[in-house]
Amino acid sequence: SIPVIVDCDPGHDDVFALWFAAGHPALDLLAVTTVGGNVALEHTSRNARIALTVAGVTDVPVAAGAAGPLVRPLETAEWIHGENGLGGPELPEPTVPLDPRSATELIADTIAASAEPVAIIATGPITNVAVLLRDRPELADGIREIVWMGGSTDRGNVTPYAEFNAWVDPEALALVVRSGVRFTMVGLNVTHRALVTAAVRERLVAAGTRTAAFGEELLEFFCRTNDEVFGMPDGPLHDPVAVAVLADPACVELRHTRLDVELNGSETAGATSVDLDGMLRREPNAWVATVLDVDRFWAGVAASVARLA
Ligand code: BDR
Ligand code: CA
């Protein structure tokens, strides 16, 4: 199985990404790191610990990383995720502790202890990975690849052309893409296919477990806020799609192409420019998800959830 670290900002869909990774036999979840994003770092760190506690995953260390982006002030998304980032269920006291190490230290130690290069799945603003590659560039060799939920080949969800994770920390994204480590972008163009319909909800909670019951309450809240904000009552569950790229590659088609990020546009900061038609004649520098096998994807997520507590 592939050794992985999940770097996240939970967030409803981040929780499902954690569960998908923790429950999948093709992945070995070695560590979790958190970043300020959907809500402030203190909440995302606590929420990651709660997600693992509920699922009975008590042997994976969780460390906090950056409180905010490399250069910009943090922008959050309480309007989708609620004040504490996990609106809906009553949140239990987590039994999974917060590791005293920083995210960078935990990732460095995890890479050092692993016999094989470790993959990083990032499901929030990609600040922690940028800090790691900036401050510890020698660790790049220990990273198998980076798969990130964010960006879009078409339109955005926070401005007309910017997706939230890209928009919060575009400088971090530019740094990571430049690093030369294999990078895969899983953007809104595919995650908007991962809609939580009534049928999907039934499928996800069919296991009847504690994790499924908690997940059901998360989805109820998440679908309601997505309906209020975007008119999408079947909320798109973005983050687990990034996990699918490694857990079950047949779920997702990738294109090797040119990815650039807009840092300065007066209206388009944080927009991802994906040159699928090769118009710019620049060297490809990223893999970009273009097609999702929706049914296969949900089957995988549901099976992972069912394997947890
Ligand atoms: C991304 O933004 C966050 O609100 C979600 O958790 C996801 O990572 C979608 O744009
Ligand atoms: Ca997220």
Image: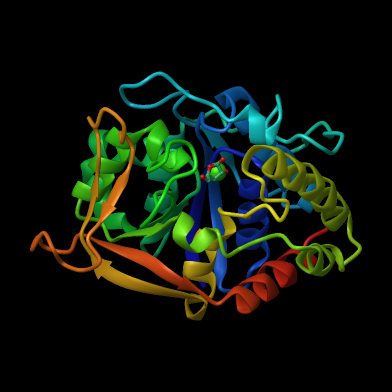
The quarter of the image that holds ligand 1 is top right
Q: Residue furthest right?
A: 208
Q: How is the structure coloured here?
A: rainbow
Image position, residue 151 (x, y; %):
39, 49
- Residue 126 at least partly seen: no
Compare residues 132 and 217 and report the one nearer the observer: 217
> Vertically, is 66 above or below 7?
above
Q: Position of residue 295 (x, y in %)?
A: 65, 77
Q: Nearer the viewer, residue 110 or 163?
A: 163
Left or right side of 14 for 309: right
The answer to which of 42 and 172 lies nearer the viewer is 172
- Quadrant including the C terminus: bottom right
Query: Residue 293 at what x, y percent from top left?
Result: 55, 77
Out of 95 and 39, give the one closest to the viewer: 39
Is residue 103 visible from the viewing direction of this image?
A: yes
**Image coords of residue 88 (percent x, y):** 82, 37
Say which quarter of the image contains residue 9.
top right
Residue at 54% over, 27% down: 76
Q: Is residue 178 left or right of residue 68?
A: left
Q: Quadrant of residue 283?
A: bottom left
Q: What residue sits 53% from the left and 68% below the top?
A: 244
- The residue at the far left in this view is 281
203 to the left or right of 297: right
- Residue at horizontal 44 percent and vertical 43 percent from the top: 163
- Give the number of callouts: 0
Q: Which residue occupies 49% across, 43% down? A: 157
